[in-house]
Amino acid sequence: PGILYIVPTPIGNLDDMTQRAQQVLASVSAIAAEDTRHSRVLLEHYGITTPMFALHEHNEREKAAGLVARLQGGESIALISDAGTPLISDPGFPLVRACRQAGVQVTALPGPSAVITALSASGLPTDKFLFAGFLPAKQQARVTALEALADETGTMVFYESPRRIAESLSAISEVLGAAREVVVAREISKQYETYLHGSAADVLAKVQADANQQRGEIVLIVAGKQLNKSDIPAEALKLLTELTALLP
Ligand code: SAM
């Protein structure tokens, strides 16, 4: 039987394509691409001529069964998206799910993904984090989504549109507090890569003051809630005071 390969592609810098990614793409029977026109340019750059077909959010559910049959018939297939790692805010989940259910071998190549790259350089804690994809585009839904994350203690990572970065920072400032530490990672691995770091209020001011900060591709990273003394429930604090008084 064939193997489904999940193959990450660069998120900006074409030199970030691994040798193994190139070898796999060159050797499989077919490549499932989110956008074949977009990926054609990439594959040409590496001299890869493997046939491609489209697998995107509008057809991936209906195509999964047929692809599982092809894999079971012995063809190996590689899955790529427009940039970075497939399935990470990109198509592929229904296919991988169907392969797992059918007992088809799935293997993922390590490679570029904006979430891990941005987090590792952010200077915010990396020991525990939550990736939450894109925040909702509408104001009320965005506020609700942030409220649900108010007690999250791990670092939070979001993908964000440059058109909405200012609105999102202002919502974070409102819901999680103006002092909450944030990082805006922009244009990673590209010419104008920048990291803005500071309180939600500070970074919002920087983004508003410079239109360039509202262009390109953005990962928004938000520090988790800090647990400090004042967060101990009042009841527990009272008990603690009473018990302390009893100590010799
Ligand atoms: N699958 C991709 C990955 O693994 O990173 C993400 C796909 S998602 C549709 C696209 C979003 O990823 C962009 O809107 C942006 O938030 C983020 N992104 C992708 N490339 C980036 C880059 N070079 N710099 C900053 N953010 C990037």
Image (spheres, grey):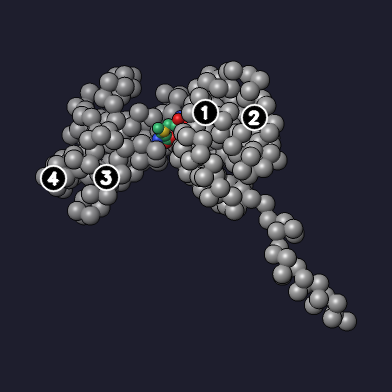
The residue that label 1 is drawn on is 164
Q: Quadrant of the C terminus?
A: bottom right
Helix, strand or loop at mark 1: loop
Q: Is residue 75 above or below residue 215?
A: below
The residue that label 2 is drawn on is 204
Q: Say which quarter of the image contains residue 18.
A: top left
Q: How far apart are the two marked residues, 4 and 1, measured between alpha carbons?
A: 42 Å
Helix, strand or loop at mark 3: helix
The residue that label 3 is drawn on is 94
The furthest residue to the front: 140
Q: How far apart are the two marked residues, 2 and 1, measured between alpha carbons?
A: 11 Å
**Residue at (45% x, 25% y) in the render:** 12
Q: How far apart are the two marked residues, 4 and 3, measured between alpha carbons?
A: 14 Å
Query: Nearest the camera: 32 or 51?
Result: 32
Q: Amino acid at mark 2?
A: Leu
Q: Counting residues from the N terminus, which is met first, the one under dot 2 or under dot 1?
A: 1
Helix, strand or loop at mark 4: helix
> Between tags 4 and 1, which lies in front?
1
Q: Amino acid at mark 3?
A: Pro
For residue 69, which numbered disc appears in the image?
4
Q: Are marks 4 and 3 in contact (CB under 8 Å)?
A: no
The answer to whether residue 33 is left or right of residue 207 is: left
Q: Tell which quarter ligand 1 is in.
A: top left
**Residue at (64% x, 38% y) in the render:** 173
Residue 40 seen? no
Query: Nearest the camera: 100 or 108?
Result: 100
